[in-house]
């Protein structure tokens, strides 16, 4: 079995590879925002990816938002080859979120970054052939495209590579 994608790690395992800084941010929010270190900046040491969150009043809420953003960034930036061989289908998480060819997950749900990483890995492994990637993930190509549309940067990443290979853009 291959190692988990960094976007799929537990929060504790992910944060073990990260540096976390607490800081103050300026802007609207009054005295509370200016006096308390509620902003969170997380840097993933292995990749150098940095994210922050400062829009909430609570440090804990900002930490949760920053961890989610880190997972999205890792899903977008880090590719992990999928296991090859007979009988290698989608992960149990993917299977639990797809049925009848549809992928049911909100882009703000904690499972979304892990699923996004799996979808992008499948698309990359299949040389950006959406039909083949969708077959691997046991969904329809249109559902896979709709899933990627939930994160515009993912769709832009796929489209950029498809265009560079002379393939049509996904809409």
Image (spheres, grey):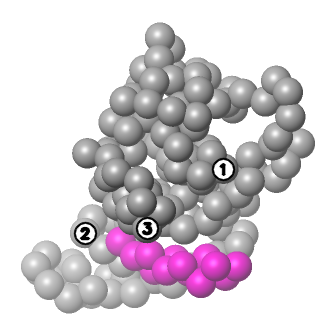
Which residue is painted at 64% across and 30% down in the image?
136
Q: Which residue is mark 2?
A: 55
x then y, percent, for residue 41: 46, 80
Separation of marks 2 and 1 at Cα, in angstroms: 37 Å
Against 26, residue 149 (above or below) is above
Q: Which residue is mark 3?
A: 164
Mark 3 vs mark 2, foreground winner is 3
Give 147 or 87, whichever is nearer the viewer: 87
Give the magenta range: 41-53
| CB-based contact (under 8 Å), mark 3 and mark 2 | no
Q: Is residue 149 magenta?
A: no
Magenta portion: prevailing SS class: strand
Q: Residue furthest front?
A: 166
Q: Earlier in the sequence, mark 3 or mark 2?
A: 2
Which residue is painted at 85% across and 27% down in the image?
86
Separation of marks 3 and 2 at Cα, in angstroms: 37 Å
Circle 2: element type: loop
Q: Which residue is mark 1?
A: 125
Would you identify the image quadrant in which residue 46 lies? bottom right
Residue 42 appears in the picture as rendered: yes
Against 93, residue 154 (above or below) is below
For disc 1, the neighbor class at 10 Å (few under 14, some 14 to 19, many from 20) is some
x then y, percent, for residue 20: 56, 79
| CB-based contact (under 8 Å), mark 3 and mark 1 | no
The C terminus, quarter of image: top left
Give 54 or 127, whichever is nearer the viewer: 127
Q: Earlier in the sequence, mark 2 or mark 1?
A: 2
Residue 118 located left or right of residue 139: right
Residue 111 appears in the picture as rendered: no
Separation of marks 3 and 1 at Cα, in angstroms: 16 Å
């Amino acid at each position: 079995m291959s190692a988990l994608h960094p976007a799929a790690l537990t929060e504790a395992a992910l944060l073990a590879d990260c540096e976390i800084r607490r800081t103050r941010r300026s802007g609207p929010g009054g005295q509370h925002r200016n006096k308390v270190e509620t902003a969170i900046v997380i840097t993933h040491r292995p990749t150098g990816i940095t994210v922050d969150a400062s829009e909430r009043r609570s440090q804990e809420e900002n930490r949760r938002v920053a961890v989610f953003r880190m997972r999205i960034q890792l899903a977008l930036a880090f590719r992990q080859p999928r296991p090859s061989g007979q009988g290698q289908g989608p992960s149990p998480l993917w299977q639990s979120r797809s049925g009848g060819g549809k992928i049911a997950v909100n882009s703000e749900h904690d499972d979304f970054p892990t699923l996004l990483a799996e979808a992008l890995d499948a698309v990359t492994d299949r040389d950006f052939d959406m039909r083949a990637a969708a077959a691997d993930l046991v969904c329809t190509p249109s559902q896979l495209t709709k899933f990627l549309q939930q994160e515009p940067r993912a769709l832009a990443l796929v489209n950029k590579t498809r265009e560079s290979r002379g393939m049509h853009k996904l809409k």
